[in-house]
């Protein structure tokens, strides 16, 4: 058992691990933002279509990422125990599980347009969104493998490469967007399909670079040696831990996807404003997600050592860091909403004033749920670190779907709150999830981590 760290030592260790992860998530979000900004300058209809198609894509992507998220605490715990064979096994099978999911999800992307029409979206926007989804759906394969490799490398605290590959991907995405959205330098003008092509190119290139790095940086793991051979025991371990994470992500992203559908019922202007406000809120969320990943790794290491006090002290520190950033973002959203929204719109866009008018109210609602969103994602990261994923899945489902979605509908339509009412419903669902997940962590996992680690070690010995 290592000596108990001070809070300042926990903060330094968390930031050393977390800041590159924050940077990589913000850079990943910059890729999405560049799509939104460049399509917004192309046309409001293209932006609205990307909001719909992108929502479907990222919903499936986050569900499939559950297996990659499972790799992170499992590799961290195995690394703490010096078990290199287990590291290789779970990383490989995380890739297997992710690819199996991508195969199952691809038909949904190909049938996106009928799904949007069934959801009551406008025909023109649904057709464009379907075009986007057909092409970007192929990017699920490299995107999910990138997530597996990022989780593997982050658990080994090799976060710098994750950061720089993602930063480089931003530039590639912007360049391909410039070429194919607008048809520059003699390339075909593809509009929304150009943005989808950029995503496919960017994620494929990122996967190749990360795979080469992982093979060279950790040769003792032999990550890609006989990668085609199944390891059913390890696959079962990854699946048991990963599918609840995927379902938790589905519950959360489903809440936001449902809000997107409801905003579409209010018209193209409302949907475009919603997409912009969601992009802004997502940038701030990426910071919390990076800290949450750091919490997962450090909690996973503490879990592997059976270090309950270190787990709880680290949790206090990472929650405090997240709260400080949430306060900063609340101030920015309330003071400069028009400036933020204007970044996504052509100055000559006829509907510019209408989109900004709706978006200002949505950003005010987004400011309201910053602390709630931060609290729930930090709690999820800590719980994943101690490999507790099924109870969070149940909590998320109740909070987001039984409470959040109905409240959004009531506030938005029954009570006439419109877009702001829909977003206030999101805040209610996030608040409930944050409270219940934090109670779960402090009331159960923190007290029992030592016992669970002992049980795991005994099971491994047997």
Image (spheres, grey):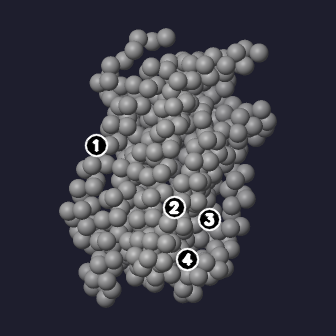
In this view, the mark in front (1 or 4)? 1
Q: Which residue is mark 2?
A: 404
- Is there CB contact under 8 Å for labels 1 and 3? no
Q: Nearer the viewer, residue 266 or 297?
A: 266
The CA distance from mark 1 to mark 3 is 37 Å
Q: Which residue is mark 1?
A: 324
Mark 3 or mark 2: which comes first in sequence? 3
In this view, the mark in front (3 or 2)? 2
In this view, the mark in front (1 or 2)? 2
**The residue tagged with tag 4: helix, strand or loop?**
helix
- Compared across the picture, whether 80 is left or right of 455 comes to left
Q: Which residue is mark 4?
A: 129
Q: Which residue is mark 3?
A: 137
The CA distance from mark 2 to mark 4 is 26 Å
- Compared across the picture, whether 161 is left or right of 102 comes to left
Mark 1 or mark 4: which comes first in sequence? 4
The CA distance from mark 3 to mark 4 is 12 Å
């Amino acid at each position: 058992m290592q000596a108990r760290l001070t809070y300042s030592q926990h903060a330094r260790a968390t930031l050393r691990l977390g800041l590159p992860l924050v940077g990589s998530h913000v850079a990943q979000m910059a890729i999405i933002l560049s799509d939104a900004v460049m399509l917004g300058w192309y046309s409001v209809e293209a932006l609205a279509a990307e909001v719909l198609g992108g929502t479907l894509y990222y919903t499936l992507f986050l569900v499939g990422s559950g297996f990659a998220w499972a790799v992170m605490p499992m590799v961290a715990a195995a690394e703490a125990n010096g078990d290199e064979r287990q590291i290789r096994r779970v990383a490989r099978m995380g890739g297997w599980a992710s690819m199996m999911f991508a195969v199952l999800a691809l038909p949904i992307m190909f049938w996106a347009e009928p799904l949007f029409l069934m959801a009551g979206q406008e025909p023109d926007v649904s057709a464009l969104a379907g075009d986007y989804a057909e092409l970007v759906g192929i990017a699920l394969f490299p995107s999910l493998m990138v997530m597996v490799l990022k989780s593997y490398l982050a658990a080994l605290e090799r976060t710098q490469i994750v950061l720089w590959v993602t930063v480089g991907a931003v530039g590639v995405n912007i360049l391909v967007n410039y070429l194919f959205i607008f048809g520059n330098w003699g390339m075909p003008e593809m509009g929304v399909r150009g943005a989808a092509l950029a995503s496919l190119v960017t994620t494929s290139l990122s996967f190749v670079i990360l795979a080469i790095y992982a093979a060279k940086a950790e040769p003792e793991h032999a990550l890609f040696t006989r990668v085609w051979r199944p390891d059913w025991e390890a696959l079962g371990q990854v699946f048991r831990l990963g599918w609840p994470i995927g379902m938790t992500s589905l519950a959360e992203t489903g809440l936001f996807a449902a809000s997107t559908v409801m905003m579409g019922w209010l018209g193209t202007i409302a949907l475009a404003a919603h997409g912009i406000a969601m992009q802004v809120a997502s940038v701030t969320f990426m910071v919390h997600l990076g800290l949450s990943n750091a919490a997962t790794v450090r909690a996973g290491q503490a879990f592997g050592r059976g270090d309950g006090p270190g787990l709880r002290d680290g949790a206090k520190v990472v929650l405090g860091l997240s709260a400080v950033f949430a306060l900063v973002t609340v101030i920015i959203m309330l003071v400069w909403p028009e400036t933020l929204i204007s970044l996504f719109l052509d100055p000559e866009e006829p509907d510019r004033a209408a989109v900004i008018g709706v978006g200002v109210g949505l950003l005010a609602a987004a400011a309201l749920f910053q602390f709630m969103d931060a609290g729930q994602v930090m709690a999820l990261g800590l719980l994943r670190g101690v490999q507790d994923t099924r109870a969070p899945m149940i909590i998320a489902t109740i909070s987001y779907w039984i409470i959040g979605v109905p409240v959004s509908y009531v506030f938005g339509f029954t009570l006439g709150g419109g877009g702001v009412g829909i977003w206030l419903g999101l805040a209610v669902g996030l608040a409930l999830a944050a409270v219940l997940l934090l109670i779960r962590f402090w009331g159960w996992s923190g007290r029992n981590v030592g016992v669970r680690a002992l049980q795991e070690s005994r099971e491994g010995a047997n």
